[in-house]
Amino acid sequence: MNVSLSEGLIVTVFSMFIVFLTLIVICFVLFGFKKLFYKENNKTLKKKTKKPERKRETIENKKEDEEELVAVLTAAVAQCMGKQSSQIRIRNIKRIKQNTSAWTKAGREEQIYNKI
């Protein structure tokens, strides 16, 4: 069966039209799902969370974390220098920003935990 060039073009254009129409329908369906389900979850999240309590907990946790950090650093420096921790005084702590990715950090932690 021989198909002419014009018939082949018509079939190609019609097929492309059906594919794009199907993709547009799928896009609208996904957009509808987002509107239906995301608003409900967002409303319930707003009702459940209370921001002032969360801020208080964060501030308290930061103070505790800083105290623990000072204690750990003091113990580490004392151990390295061979002195008692009461003889060492940490005046300030300066954090250095690391330019490593989350994957790199996870790999390092995994190696450390595997050695323990």
Image: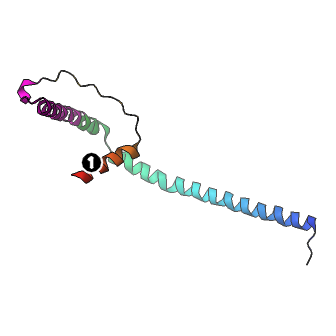
Query: Where is residue 56 drawn, in percent x and y?
Result: 24, 35
Query: Where is residue 28 drawn, in percent x and y?
Result: 63, 56
Query: Where is residue 41 drawn, in percent x and y?
Result: 42, 53
Q: Nearer the viewer, residue 108 or 10?
A: 108
Overall secondary structure of the magenta stretch? helix
Residue at 21%, 22% in the rendered image = 92
Residue at 30%, 50% in the rendered image = 111
Whether 38 is drawn above or below 59: the answer is below
Residue at 19%, 33% in the rendered image = 69
Q: Nearer the viewer, residue 52 or 14?
A: 14
Q: Secondary structure at mark 1?
A: helix
Whether 53 is among the magenta residues is no
Tell me the colour scheme of the image: rainbow
Q: Nearer the viewer, residue 94 or 36?
A: 94
Query: Where is residue 52 drawn, in percent x and y?
Result: 28, 36
Please give left or right for residue 26 compared with residue 78 in the image: right
Whether 71 is among the magenta residues is yes
Question: Start and end of the magenta stretch?
Answer: 59-88
The local crowd at label 1, few if under 14, some if 14 to 19, many if 20 or more residues have their Cα within 10 Å, is few
Classify residue 73 by image quadrant: top left
Instruction: Tell me the quarter of the image containing the N terminus.
Output: bottom right
Please give left or right for residue 52 compared with residue 68 in the image: right
**Please, what is the three-letter code of the amino acid marked with disc 1?**
Ile
- Residue receiving disc 1: 112
